Structure formats: C-alpha cells, structure tokens
Image (cartoon, rainbow, N blue to C red):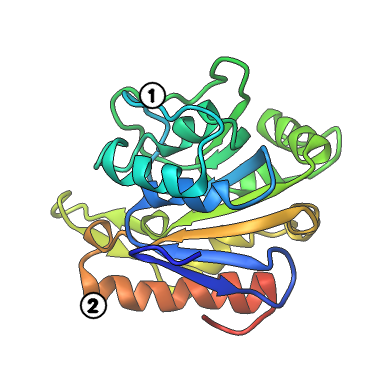
Amino acid sequence: MSRAGIIELGIAGKGPTRGYVFDQHRLALPCWAETPGPSLLLTFDRHFDTVVPKNPPPRGLSVDEYDRHARDLLDHHNYDHVLAAMEAGIISDAIIVARAKPVGAVTSDWHEHEIIAASTLDLITAEWGTAHATPEGKRAHAAVARSKSIILDVDLDCFTTPSDADPTTVVPWSLELIRDFMKPRGSAEFWSSVLNKCVGFTFAREPSHCGGLIASGRLFEHACQVLFAELFETDLP
C-alpha cells in the first residue's frame, strides 16, 4: 500500500506480518481495511477514540475510498475512527486499553459491537483464562477465543501522562514504564493468544500529543523496543 503519510512495514517475527505507521490516527481506517476481517481490535491509547462519527463510512468501499473518507470525512481530532470501522464492517468488537474519555466517547457495548474497556492491560491479563480473572478479562478472553483475526493498534500517546504542573504538556514514559505497561506480570499467555491470531499492526505517532517531534521521536524508539524487539521478536523498524 502506497499512500501519503502511511509507511508500510514487513514484520518477520511473532504475530502480524504487516504493519503500518502514520501520524494521524484516523489513517488506521484504510490500513485496517487492507486486512482480512471483520477483526477484533486490540487498541492501546491515552484516549478512548470511540466518539460516534458524524460521517460514518458505508460498507463495501475500496481501500482507496476508505483512505479518502478517513482523510476528508472523519473528525480531525482523530477520535471517531474505531466506531467508523465498526460501521464499515471492518472491525467487529474491540478491546480498548485507554484512560481519558473525550466528550461523547462510548465505553460500553455499541449496537451489536462489544467494547471491552480497561485503563491498564493488567486488568485484562490477570489470571487470564481462569475463573479468577476480572470481568473485563473474562470478556476479553471470550472475544479473543471466538475471533478469527485480530488487529493490534497502538497510539504513541498511550505512553504519556499529562504534567501535574501544566496539564497542557505531557510527560513521555521511560522504556521501563512502557515495558511494565505492555508486558505486565503473567501476560505471556495473553500475548500468545493475541499474536497467534494477529493479522495486522497499526501504530499512530501523533507527535502533537507526545510533546513534539523530538520528544515523540525518542518515545517512538522506546515503544518500538518493546513492541518489535520484545513482543514481535523481530528487527526494529
């Protein structure tokens, strides 16, 4: 796929073989449309990007048409692409690990789509697949088990925290904090279940939400170390 602002990656490791990197998160829509689906979405973000779209895309468009729709008709705040993909039949259900809720964001089931929401991954992975799992973990386990394909999605701003001194600025996380967040104790079986069915990976950089170009570049390197080298067990992009 050759489209403005989207970098396609070949991934030779565990999990997905195709990945896409871009800045604006709504550009995930055409990338998700490239994969066989509908798929379960596992997304990591600072915000719940589940605001109901004012201009939802119809089903059955070509990937080029979804690309134009994402650029021109989805919200430039980049918070309505998940439900847009559900409207289009590209995404079936979603496991969303996020903390901030924009006005109008949906954090419970929407129409026929299941939305499993958690603020941290360990709420889902603790006691994975057992009777002692959390309610979110039990729902996520059932969703992964019944899904034929999974898309893994990450927004780089997931690994930032608003500054206590100035809420308009963000503090990027360290490599160690990203690793602890993405790979909590006891999550190996969860990741094995997910990566065995993962058909695509999307990564939004959104530098304006990550402290600017320099700070986001450093944060991107730390995140790639965890995602590519440690989860996918492959070369850095």
- Is 218 rendered above or below residue 170? below
Q: Nearer the viewer, residue 221 or 33?
A: 33
Residue at (66%, 32%) from the top-left corner?
Answer: 136
- Is 72 rendered above or below residue 204? above
x, y percent for residue 101: 36, 32
Residue at (60%, 36%) from the top-left corner?
Answer: 91
x, y percent for residue 26: 37, 46
What is the number of the mark on residue 52? 1
Q: Nearer the viewer, residue 123 or 225?
A: 225
Q: Residue furthest bottom?
A: 235
Q: Amino acid at mark 1?
A: Val
What is the number of the mark on residue 214? 2
Q: Is residue 205 left or right of residue 85?
A: left
Residue at (43%, 30%) from the top-left corner?
Answer: 57
Task: Name the image quarter holding residue 130.
Answer: top right
Q: Is residue 197 left or right of residue 64?
A: right
Label 2: how many Cα within 10 Å (few below 14, some 14–19, many 20+) = few
Residue at (51%, 26%) from the top-left corner?
Answer: 87
